């Protein structure tokens, strides 16, 4: 796995949870020219997406616990201090879930 972005405030990872992983692989592979590589984690299949030689995203099936949740992209942002960033976000109006 390539090293994720480690700069405070930078988007460091993207992940798709979907009901149809094969269709998503075909769509995004064609759209972006991604190379897709399947792997098995402890309890699920996971697909790494590469742009050139850099891993840029992951794709996985929505877990059964998600119920009727629609397919969704999640974006991860690097922060230097999680608790400080959460407190700042709350001070700016975010709600903690």
Image (spheres, helix red, strand yellow):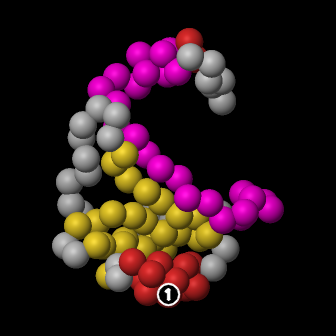
Does the image show residue 35? yes
How many marks overall?
1
Residue 82 locus on image (x, y percent): 40, 25
Residue extending furthest toward the right: 68
Q: Is residue 63 above or below residue 84?
A: below
Res 6 → quadrant:
top left
Residue 30 locus on image (x, y percent): 43, 86
Q: Is residue 52 above or below residue 2?
A: below
Res 85 → quadrant:
top left
Residue depicted at x 30% and y 73% = 50
Residue depicted at x 67% and y 74% = 19
Q: Is residue 72 left or right of residue 89?
A: right
Determine if the magenta segment contains residue 65. yes
Residue 36 locus on image (x, y percent): 36, 80
Please provide the residue range marked out in magenta.
Answer: 64-89
Residue extending furthest toward the top: 91
97 vs 40, nearest the viewer? 97
Which quarter of the rendering shows the C terminus?
Answer: top right
Q: Is residue 50 left or right of residue 58?
A: left
Does the image show residue 25? no
Residue 52 locus on image (x, y percent): 22, 75
Helix, strand or loop under label 1: helix
82 vs 45, nearest the viewer? 82
Determine if the magenta segment contains residue 54. no
Q: Is residue 68 left or right of residue 60?
A: right
Residue depicted at x 48% and y 74% = 45
Label 1 neighbour load within 10 Å: few <14, some 14-19, many 20+: few
Q: Which residue is mark 1?
A: 26
Residue depicted at x 28% and y 72% = 51
37 vs 26, nearest the viewer? 26
């Amino acid at each position: 796995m390539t090293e994720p972005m480690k700069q405070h405030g930078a988007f460091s990872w993207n992940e798709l949870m979907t009901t149809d992983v094969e269709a998503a692989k075909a769509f995004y592979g064609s759209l972006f020219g991604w190379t897709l590589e399947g792997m098995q984690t402890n309890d699920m299949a996971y697909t790494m997406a590469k742009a050139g030689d850099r891993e840029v995203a992951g794709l996985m099936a929505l877990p059964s616990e998600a119920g009727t949740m629609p397919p969704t992209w999640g974006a991860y942002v690097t922060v230097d201090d999680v608790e400080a960033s959460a407190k700042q976000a709350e001070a700016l109006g975010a709600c903690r879930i």
